[in-house]
Amino acid sequence: MISFNSAKSVSSSVIPTNQAYVSSRKMVPPRQAIALISEHGDPAAEIGKDAAGGQNVYVRQVGEALAKLGWQVDMFTRKTKPDDAAIVQHAPHCRTIRLVAGPEQFIPRDELFAYMPEFVAAFQAFQSKEGTHYPLIHTNYWMSAWVGLQLKQQSNIQLIHTYHSLGAIKYQTVPTRPAIADTRLAIEQQVLEQADCIVATSPQEQEALRTLVSERGYVEVIPCGTDVSNFHTMPKTEARAALGFGSNESIMLYVGRFDPRKGIETLVKACAQLKANAEHENRATGTALNPAALRLVIVGGRDPDSDDIVEYTRIEQLVRETGLADQTTFAGQIGHASLPLYYTAADVCVIPSHYEPFGLVAIEAMACGTPVVASDVGGLKFTVVPDETGLLVPPQDVEAFTQAIDRVLTDELWAKKLRRQAPIRVQRNFSWSGVAAHLSDLYRRSLAQSISNTLCLGSPDVGGLDNSRAERTQLERQEVYPIHAEIAAPSALTKVS
Ligand code: UDP
């Protein structure tokens, strides 16, 4: 592995000429160190609770896969519990580093920005202590983007960014915009225009960036992935027996966080409708689904100290009100080791999100050969192929979800075709190793560009205006887009006591 721009490399002008080559070679670390920053999505956290979800999985999986490709990967997050280890070593060349930035406790995301200057300082202190310098930083989510922009302002780094969620879309669907909204929107625009590359996880996200955020900036599409050695097909009867579900049950599965924007309410109402329809049709013809055999399985953790408990309580109440209590299983937080059993046991996996930038659950379910009924939004339009791996329906449309789920549960021949095709699509397009290979290639080009000053990012076939970004020098960018022109300093915001 070539090493770029290491702080430990020594300028040849200060080394006696008789030993210059040998000694500088000795001091070059064997692997290039890179930093992934994920301020709130701790890559070492247990997935599925404490609001841990797709971002945590993405950073951890990408980090581990990049380490296998020869990088030294350091993943930085904020320390949220005093008892958590400061450093978690996942593999010989991949670790999570928890920086102290603000109180070591859960802080709601809308209040976290105030602690980002401390995060920057802690990151720099860590670099100094280790005697290293990360020439490439890949940030995740908008607050990490702000951290990355600060670091880029202070030293020569390549900044790559993945959004995971876009304020411009999120704020369209929430009843009230939080105080932080304008700051977030400004930073999301700034990072698009000033980062060396934005990684969009689907063509739909790239399109949203262009239409809702800015026409400037360079974007490459590299999807999320899944661990195809963990999520794979197995006999449904075995999975049901292992989990204690009956072989005659019609199982609908939800996997994910308890968050109103995940649309669990739509699924519960669709199940109630399905049951009512089945009862009615059975009375009339005796041929429909057995209403008593319908089972809704909801997988996902909730923490009494976190925001997700509010949504969990609301959904549990809705389940009772709709008469589904006896036919619903709240399975709680399930780790990735056992999750394939749930996907396999299910007849259909339902993803009723109001919006989903990518939606890892869709590809996990498909990898296990389970058809997906999902909202026709965001990255789900990219991963789920209608009639091939599942169905897409309008978000929050209870009737449409009811019909789509009914079709998967009753049209056996067609559902069998979906079960066969779904894993093939995932293996071909969405393995973590493939995703990491694309990212690794991007990092190499980005670093090569920084040391050679020649254009290695950008290609004529990447979305019209992306080329304009590639033609600008760093100096031009800084003149055109002064950093933090309209963004309030975090210190001006309220901190939790
Ligand atoms: N997840 C899990 N256990 C749970 C609930 C969720 O491991 O109990 C994982 C799930 O397998 C997926 C991630 O959390 O990998 C959710 O990612 P997704 O992109 O679907 O949603 P996000 O959390 O990013 O909104």
Image (cartoon, rainbow, N blue to C red):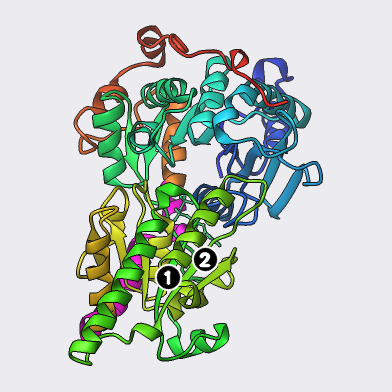
Q: Which mark is residue 186?
A: none
* Disc 2 element: strand
Verify CB contact (< 8 Å) between mark 1 and mark 2.
Answer: yes
Question: Mark 1 sits on what residue?
Answer: 253
Q: What residue is shown at x 46% (from left), y 39% (from top)?
A: 444
In this view, the residue in front, 83 or 425, is 83
Q: Position of residue 279 (x, y in %)?
A: 28, 82
Q: Nearer the viewer, residue 111 or 431?
A: 111
Q: Is residue 367 above or below residue 149?
A: below
Disc 1 Cβ-to-ligand 1 distance below 8 Å: no
Q: Which residue is mark 2?
A: 299
- Give the percent coordinates (x, y) of residue 365: 41, 69
Question: What secondary structure characterizes most of the magenta part?
Answer: helix
Query: Residue 239, how many percent across, how many down?
Result: 50, 84
Is residue 185 visible in this depiction of the protein?
yes
Q: From the viewer's perspective, is 231 left or right of 102?
A: left
Q: Quadrant of the N terminus?
A: top right
Residue 91 at x, y percent in the picture: 68, 56
